[in-house]
Image (cartoon, rainbow, N blue to C red):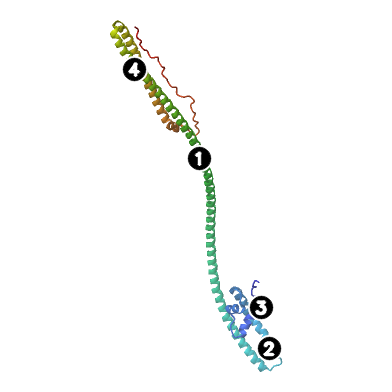
Amino acid sequence: MARTGVTQNDIDTAADALLLAGERPTVERIRAALGRGSPNTVGRLLDAWWVQLGQRLAAKQRQVAVVDAPEEVSELASGLWRTALSVARNVVEQDVTTTRQQLAAAAVTLEADRRSLGEAREAMEIEQTRLQAALDHAQARNEDLVQQLQAIDAQKTRAETQADAATAARDAIAQQLEQARTSAATAAKHTAQERAALIAHSQTVEERAAQNVDRLRQDLKTAKQDAQAHEKEFKTRTAALESALRSAQKDAADARKAEAVASARADALGVQFANLPAALQAALGPKTTVRRSSQQPKTNSGKKRPSKRVTSTS
C-alpha cells in the first residue's frame, strides 16, 4: 500500500509527546518519531503547532483554574503559569529560529538538489538525443547492410547461373572438340591408307617398268646375237630397239614422276590432317558444329602401259 502524507494532527501529537518527554520538538525528531514526512511539510506543520501552542496553554490554564481558591493561591498559580508560559515562549522562539534556520538550509540544499536534478535531466536529455541519433544511424546502417546483403545474394545467384551456363558451354565445346578429333583421326587413317595404296601402286609400276627394262635388255642381247647373222636386219632392228627403249624409259620416268607427285600429295594431306585439331580448336566458337567432309581424296592410279617387245624376224 502507498504511504500517506503527514497531517497537522500527526505533527501535534508527536510534538506534544516530545514536549511531555522533556525534549524540544524539531523537524528531525518529529520525522524520526513518525517515520515519514518531508522536511518542508513537517517544518510548515510544526510552525503551525508552535503558533497554536500559546492558545492551547491558555485554554489549559483556564481548565486548571481552581474555583473558589484563595487569592494567594490563585496569584501563586498564575505566577507559576506565567513563568511557564514565558519559558515556553522562549523555548518556542528558539525552536522556531532553529527550525527556520534548518528550513532555510534545507531549502538551499533542496534548491541545489533541484539544480543538480535539472542539470542531470538536461544531461540525460542530451544523452537520450545522442542515443536516439545513434540508434537512428544504426537502424539506417542496418537497412543499408540488409540491402547490400540482398544485392550480394542476387550477384551470387547470377554468378552461379553464369557458372552453370559456362560449364554447359564448356562441356558442349569439349564434345565438339572430341568429335572433331575423332573425325580428324578417321580422316588421317583414310589418308594413311590412301598413301599406302599410292606407294604400293608406285612400287608396282616401278617393278613393272624394271621388268620391262629387263625384258628389253634381254631382247637387245638376243638382237645383238642375231645381228651377227643378220647384219642387214640388225640395223632395222637396232632402230626399232632404240625406239622401244626410249619409250620404256619414258614410261619409267612417267611412273617415277607419278610416284613423286603421289608421295608429295600424301605428305601434304598428312600435314594438313596433323594440323587439323589445332585449327579446329582455334576456329571453334561458343556454338560451332564441325562438319565432316564426305569427299575422300582421289587417288591417281597410273595406267598400265603395255610393254613393247621387239620380236625378231627371220
Residue of label 2: 64
**First reached walking from the N terminus: tag 1 or tag 3:** 3
Q: Nearer the viewer, residue 301 or 49?
A: 301
Q: Earlier in the sequence, mark 3 or mark 2?
A: 3
- In this image, 41 relative to 299: left or right? right
Density class for disc 2 (Cα within 10 Å; few <14, some 14-19, many ≥20) is: few
Label 4–label 1 contact, CB within 8 A: no
Mark 1 element type:
helix
Who is closer to the viewer here, 294 or 287?
Answer: 294
Helix, strand or loop for disc 3: helix
Q: Quadrant of residue 75?
A: bottom right
Q: CA distance from mark 3 to mark 4?
A: 165 Å
99 vs 114: above or below = below
Question: What residue would you read off at disc 1?
Answer: 167
For disc 3, the marked residue is 9
Q: CA distance from mark 4 to mark 2?
A: 188 Å
What is the x, y in percent for residue 62? 68, 86
Residue 5: quadrant of the picture: bottom right
> 268 or 237: which is nearer to us?
237
Judge depth for marks 2 and 1 and give the one in front.
1
